[in-house]
Image (spheres, coloured by chain):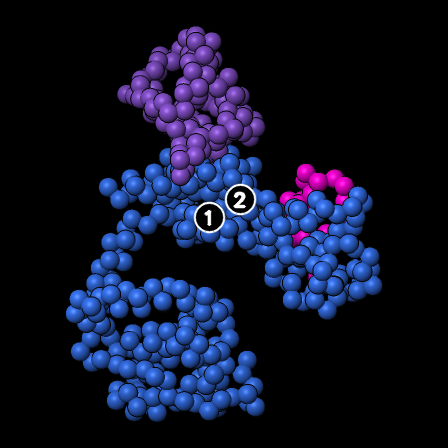
Amino acid sequence: MPVSTKIKEPVLPPIVVDPGSPITMAAQITEQIKLLIVLGKLQPNQVLPPLARLAEHLGISNSTITAVYNELIATGYLVAHRGKGTFIADSPQVRQLANRKHFYDLLGEAFSSASQFGITASEFASAAYAQAAIKERHLLNLVLVNFLPDTINVIQSLQLETGLFVRSVEWTKLEAKELQVLTELAEADLVITSTKHIWDVANSLPDTNTEIIGIDVQPDMQLLSRISSLPRNSKVLFVCQNQSGSQVMQHLTTSNINHIESIPVTLEWVQQNTQSVRDFDLVVCSPQIESQLFKYILHQKLIVFGIRIDPLNLLVLQARLAAISMEKSL
Amino acid sequence: MLLVNSQRQIAGVSPSLVKIWHLPELVLRARSEELVLNVVSEQFGNPQVFLREMAEIYAKQELELHEIIQLRDGRHIERHSKPLWTNGIYAGRMWAFKLTE
């Protein structure tokens, strides 16, 4: 949320437009604003020039800039404050964009290579679209039917291990036979779920030929080795925003460990029992609340809960992904 | 479709597998391929021969097979099996079945 004292003077962003491009003026400006965010040249809470000023600077109509600003507001990249102006939003969308720097760097490198062959920016855009359109047909459509709370970031681990985008649907929505979820699963090349729930998912799928692979998640090696090295009867606290998340972290961690005493609690409990927290030898927290625990817990006693996917079935998943990918490309 | 990992635990299925082999829920929930094979073997004319043949298949990691088999109830099933490899590491085995007309 922008505060008036922190508002920077609006500066004209270094945007260029090409009226001869096959890409619309609005799309050119929209994508350049996003790129400037990725490059850090436009930052959250930074004010943008009034639309009339930007339109005049670029020599285009006010309505085009209005369309750009409206589109970026609707998609969460900008935020408008009455009487103050339009700002880069401090939103998950903007943070997510900043995480895509590697992708933008690759695009930059691709264009550098293309320009050596005399390919213009417009030709590059069209060629990139053609390539993407063909690739998209061969991309694997993976869906995870998730039984774990969001605090256990299975999607991130899966994407890291497979190098592929994975969509997540909640088990409760599949169980309720929500149409959108059934459609997503019917279109999936492969459905992933926890090994314990393969049967439940198999029973709920509309298409009897859908392939389902089960995976198990475990705490990462850093956490396991830290807990294993604790003396007998050490006290370990598991902290999450909510109780069920803490219980899942505790269950996953201690299912094969019995030399420690562990208690799952909420962040609120920690905030209300700061004295008691000091009695614990180790505090395991979800990544989302780590920064909020620093003022209650010594840095050395705090460890973030991380997971890894059990390698046995991960190997099966990777083998099947390679085979399905090959079948799709034929 | 049945996917078995390198420890011969069930790693994946397709719902059609359950229908073809009439597998009970408890057997699948146990995730043990051994239990599945026991149930399946009873559907062959000679269960012992089937189980011995399966042991031979697993003994030969590289083996691929594609054949039609006949069940005790008269049904014919296409059976395909091949090993799963990830970066040269044996990951398990895939089985695919299809009822023939």
Point out residue A227 in the picture as x, y percentages from the top left corner: 70, 47
Dot 1: element: helix
Q: Chain B is shown in which shade?
A: purple
Number of residue marks: 2
Mark 2 surroundings: few (<14), some (14-19) or many (≥20) residues within 10 A: some
What residue appears at the point 41 percent right and 24 percent down from the top-left corner? B61
* Residue name at image x 31 percent, y 78 percent: A29
Note whether A33 is above or below A304 in the view shown.
Answer: below
The reply to whether the magenta stretch includes residue A253 is: yes
Chain containing the residue with disc 2: A
The answer as to whether the residues below labels 1 and 2 share one chain is: yes
Number of residues whose C-alpha sits closer than 10 Å to that of mark 1, classed few (under 14), some (14–19) or many (20 or more): some
Task: Identify whether A291 is placed above or below A182.
Answer: below
Query: Which amino acid type corresponds to the residue marked 2 in the rendered image?
Result: Ile
Q: Position of residue A5 (x, y in %)?
A: 57, 90
Mark sitting on residue A309 = 2
Tell me the amino acid under the disc marked 1: Glu
Give the side of residue B39 with respect to residue A220, left or right: left
Q: Earlier in the sequence, mark 1 or mark 2?
A: 1
Is A219 placed left or right of A36 in the picture? right
Camera-nearest residue between A20 and A307: A307
Instruction: Examine the rendering and report whether any part of residue B54 can be seen.
Output: no
Say if residue A32 shows up in the picture: yes
Q: Which chain is blue?
A: A
Q: Which residues are magenta?
A: A245-267
Disc sitting over residue A161 in the figure: 1
Residues at circles 1 and 2 in contact by the CB criterion of under 8 Å: yes
